[in-house]
Amino acid sequence: MRRCAGATVRWWVVVMTLVAATADAQTARRFDSGEAWEHLRQQVSFGPRPSGSAALAQCRQYILAQLKAAGMTAREDAFDSETPLGRVRMVNVIATIPGRRTDRIVLATHYDTKLFREFRFVGASDGASSTAAVLELGRVLKAQQNEYTIELVFFDGEEAVVEWRAGDNTYGSRHYVDAAKKAGTLASLKAFILLDMIGDRNLNIRRDSNSTKWLTDFVWTSARKLGYASSFPNDETTIDDDHMPFVQAGVPSVDIIDLDYPAWHTVQDDLDHVSARSLQVVGDVVLESLPEIQKRLVATSAR
């Protein structure tokens, strides 16, 4: 009887261990808006984070620490930009999740905030929300086998230092594309997915006419499949953002952005005007669309 009871206990321990391991694996594959919200909150706690500021350097160290904690190797790509206010040192952060293929898909965001001297701008949606989502997407994607290598890119200098005009914006993405051209690595970049301003409580992400149609279609189809069509209407708009240097370089690109955000570039872009649910919606849509995007790329490469 004692041997039988002991065997039963051992069997039960094995079963519960397997159940726990399965649950952990399922959790690892899911986007966790609670984790993403904490990333957003931490960024906002640093205060305004314009390019070249001490607060942005703190934010960058936080990003690097989170990437390391998720088991990713990341590097800083520092460069100097000439701006209307003089030369500014900027730093992109790049992390790589190796896939079966060395060809890459980039998931990108900007982590700087717009410089405002007249009020305190913490950029809860405009900068922090998309950065939070990319960090959490990285955790999920690191825990699974991907067909393509996934590169996470956190751009500095998306925001205009003074005002949005030719030359005074998208410093980090323009630097990335220029460096890739010089290094001869742009050809291995097969798709570029940009997240920006995705925290709006009333999420309304319209199709961008500058984005690549087939890539946009995959994202919007995934949103409908998941029941998020109301957050991804088929209305079209035209956006100038960090994806444009990639579009101009011939890289298939899509910009996932809610530019209808009422608090955009105001003091109200704070924690009270963003939502963890919006982060969940976008995270779910990106994770749903990525396998289909990879299948399309595999099929195209086989032709």
Image: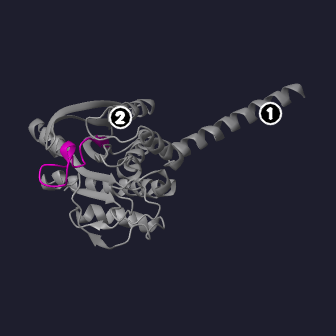
Mark 2 falls on what kind of element? helix
Three-letter residue code for mark 1: Thr
Q: Disc 2 versus disc 1: distance between alpha carbons?
A: 57 Å
Q: Which residues are magenta?
A: 149-173
- Indicate the quadrant containing the N terminus: top left, top right, bottom left or bottom right: top right
Estimate how packed mark 2 is, as few (under 14), some (14 to 19) or many (20 or more) residues with alpha carbons within 10 Å.
some
Q: Quadrant of residue 198?
A: bottom left
Q: Which residue is mark 2?
A: 55
Percent x, y of residue 107: 32, 47
**Residue at point 13% right, 52% down?**
249
Left/right placement of residue 34 relative to residue 234 reads right
Which label is found at residue 8?
Answer: 1
Q: Position of residue 281 (x, y in %)?
A: 46, 58
Residue extending furthest left? Answer: 182
Q: Quadrant of residue 268?
A: bottom left
In the image shown, does 187 or 121 lie closer to the viewer?
Answer: 121
Are the two marked residues, 2 and 1, in contact with CB atoms closer than 8 angstroms?
no
Left/right placement of residue 9 relative to residue 121 reads: right
